[in-house]
Image (tube, grey):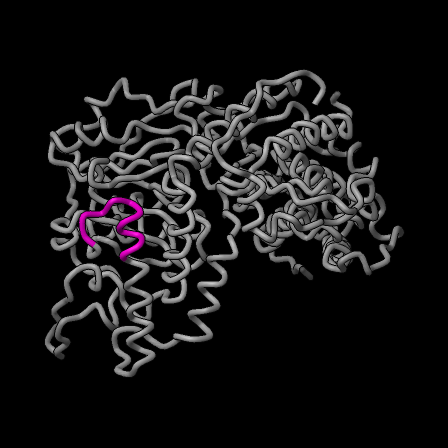
């Protein structure tokens, strides 16, 4: 970095945090140290999580619930222990409000299938232009199945949700409002509680995609205003293969089953079956057992550090990155350019260089970013671009890594002769 | 992971001024292909005269590798029998899947040899194949209409 920048201040001891993530000290091709700026895609894992998985598999492994032996009891206790930890982590009033799925996409599909079952022609489902495809396609399918209409909140030039026509979108015909809390592409943090109040006033159910929110700041579902909320394990330093759907218990209890199979039933007869109470109703088949243990360890790890501190660090690093990126000639940030209400992902365009080429050149310097439409094609169309490069940050991201990105972008420009 | 082996000057030249860019009339078949994971898109038109490729034009959005590969592909197939174009594709595919262990045949691949370095970047191979997949699809459809036979 050539010119003086804002001093960086974070409440986290980054050296000690990074020591928990062995992968961060890896060296990549040509001797470049790893600069991992793709945590919105998938976060890295601390030793604690990997050790919890190993400990479970090596000492306590068995199927849950249906196994009548000692190991079965241990595995069941470990799996249900993961549920307790997740419930506490997001402020769920009851452990029975936590449904384990395989990822956030399955959680949102579960929501769309079960809530969507009662939609009919004339009903309206409202989503937004800044959604991830996993919060678009399940609702498109639900509307196709039922004849309900899908409506969209737009996005302003600044990359914020356009609430100017909220009274036209949320009416007595609106049955479901499903929104992302933090945009994975723009980084925008949306005012969920205010929108939820409007939705509830007309009797609509509120679904929140919290995949980029739960990793980044303290979440309390008891005061948020959502009725259902989805997130995934692998973005909160947990393992892949597990996602979470939280739901208000009274709502979950009314919903029909999603997938059929073992453990989700009460009584199966050849004439028909009755179903278990939530959460078991929505957990057909052998669940992600070790993954629930790992997710429990992950949220314990984050709580140990403190979600308030992680949020403050994210804010500081995003502010630092926004400022650094603004010094790169020809660079245009998609979405909010100020750190207020900005999550830990920044997408941008670089004049004259396609995002894939940006990513490949950065990659040869050890810098891992994402290039493409980040599973959010409509919002790219909104800004008239086909794709973008995205850098995303987490509790282990250092200001030096942001500087490596900014310097790397300078190199990209000179390599492609746009400098 | 050598940048210069990936971004050869020939590739950057084709990227900056792609050959046969801009959709032209007349044509037999138009197709639209995408790489869903990254968003690259190509619209491509093919015109055949019997079994000979008389015209290929395209309009594409995407990275340097996909744009340049599409440009080089048009040079390699226009004016040639369909079967020869399909055989060239097989050679190009072999090069792309060779992980850097395949010696490219410049007689057949011409400017396409510049893509040898792409094989060492597995994430980019699909970029280099996008235009080819569009051409093969459009050509197969055009042949099906006229009752010709594709060797693809």
Q: Which of the image's four quarters has the C terminus of chain B?
A: bottom right
Q: Residue, x 46% and y 28% (percent of image)?
A: A315
Q: How many marks?
A: 0
Q: What residue appears at the point 66 percent right and 16 percent down from the top-left corner?
A: A4
Residue A122 horizontal/vertical position (percent): 15, 37
In percent of width and height, residue B119 lies at: 75, 53
Horizontal and vertical percent position of residue A256: 16, 57
A229 or B82: which is nearer to us? Answer: A229
The image shows residue A14, relative to residue A138, as above or below, that is above
Residue at the (15%, 51%) spot, across then down? A249
B25 displayed left or right of A156: right
User: Where residue A323 sits in the image (x, y, percent)?
Assistant: 57, 20
Residue furthest to the bottom: A69
In magenta stretch: residue B112? no
> Can I make out residue B59 in this image?
no
Residue A66 horizontal side relative to residue B78, left or right: left
Q: Residue at x 26, y 78 (%)?
A: A66
Residue A197 seen by the camera: yes
What is the quadrant of residue A62 in the picture?
A: bottom left
Quadrant of res A204: top left
Figure check: A160 above or below A65: above
Position of B9 relative to B6 (above/below): above
Residue B86 vs residue A335, the one in the foreground: A335
Q: Nearer the viewer, residue B116 or A417?
A: A417
Q: Range of the magenta residues?
A: A84-94
């Amino acid at each position: 970095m050539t010119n003086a920048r804002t001093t960086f201040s974070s409440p986290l001891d980054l050296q000690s945090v990074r020591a928990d993530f062995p992968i961060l000290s890896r060296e990549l091709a040509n001797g470049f140290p790893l600069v991992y700026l793709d945590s919105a895609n998938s976060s890295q894992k601390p030793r604690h999580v990997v050790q919890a998985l190993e400990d479970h598999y090596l000492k306590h492994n068995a199927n849950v619930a249906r196994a009548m032996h000692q190991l079965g009891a241990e595995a069941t206790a470990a799996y249900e222990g993961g549920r307790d930890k997740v419930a506490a982590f997001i402020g769920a009033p009851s452990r029975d409000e936590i449904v384990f799925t395989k990822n956030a996409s399955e959680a949102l599909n579960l929501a769309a299938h079960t809530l969507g079952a009662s939609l009919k022609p004339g009903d309206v489902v409202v989503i937004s232009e800044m959604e991830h495809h996993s919060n678009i396609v399940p609702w498109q399918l639900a509307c196709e199945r039922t004849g309900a209409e899908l409506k969209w909140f737009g996005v302003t030039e600044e990359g914020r949700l356009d609430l100017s026509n909220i009274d036209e979108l949320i009416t007595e015909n609106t049955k479901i409002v499903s929104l992302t809390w933090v945009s994975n592409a723009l980084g925008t943090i949306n005012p969920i509680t205010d929108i939820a109040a409007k939705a509830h006033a007309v009797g609509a159910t509120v679904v929140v995609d919290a995949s980029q929110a739960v990793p980044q700041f303290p979440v309390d579902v008891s005061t948020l205003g959502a009725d259902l909320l989805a997130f995934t394990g692998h973005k909160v330093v947990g393992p892949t293969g597990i996602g979470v759907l939280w739901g208000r218990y009274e709502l979950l209890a009314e919903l029909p089953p999603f997938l059929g199979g073992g453990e989700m039933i009460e009584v199966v007869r050849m004439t028909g079956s009755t179903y278990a109470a939530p959460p078991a109703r929505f957990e057909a088949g052998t669940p992600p057992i070790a993954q629930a243990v790992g997710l429990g360890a992950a949220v314990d790890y984050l709580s140990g550090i403190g979600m308030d501190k992680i949020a403050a660090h994210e804010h500081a690093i995003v502010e630092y990155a926004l400022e650094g990126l603004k010094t790169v000639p020809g660079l245009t940030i998609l979405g909010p350019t100020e750190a207020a209400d900005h999550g830990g992902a920044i997408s941008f365009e670089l004049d004259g260089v396609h995002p894939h080429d940006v990513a490949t050149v950065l990659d040869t310097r050890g810098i891992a970013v994402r290039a493409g439409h980040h599973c959010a094609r409509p919002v790219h169309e909104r800004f008239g671009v086909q794709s973008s490069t995205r850098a995303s940050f987490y509790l282990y991201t250092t200001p030096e890594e942001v500087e490596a990105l900014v310097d790397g972008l300078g190199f990209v420009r000179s390599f492609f002769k746009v400098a | 992971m050598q940048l210069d082996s990936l971004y050869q000057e020939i590739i950057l030249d084709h990227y900056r001024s792609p050959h046969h860019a801009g959709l032209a009339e007349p044509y037999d078949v138009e197709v639209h292909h995408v790489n869903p994971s990254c968003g690259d898109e190509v619209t491509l038109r093919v015109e055949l005269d019997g079994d000979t490729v008389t015209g290929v034009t395209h309009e594409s959005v995407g990275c340097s590798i996909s744009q340049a590969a599409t440009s080089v592909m048009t040079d390699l197939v226009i004016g040639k029998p369909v079967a020869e174009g399909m055989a060239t594709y097989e050679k190009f595919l072999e090069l792309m899947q060779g992980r850097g262990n395949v010696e490219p045949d410049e007689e057949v691949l011409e400017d396409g040899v510049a893509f040898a370095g792409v094989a060492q970047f597995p994430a980019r191979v699909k970029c280099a194949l996008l235009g080819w997949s569009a051409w093969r699809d459009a050509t197969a459809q055009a042949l099906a209409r006229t009752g010709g036979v594709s060797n693809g």
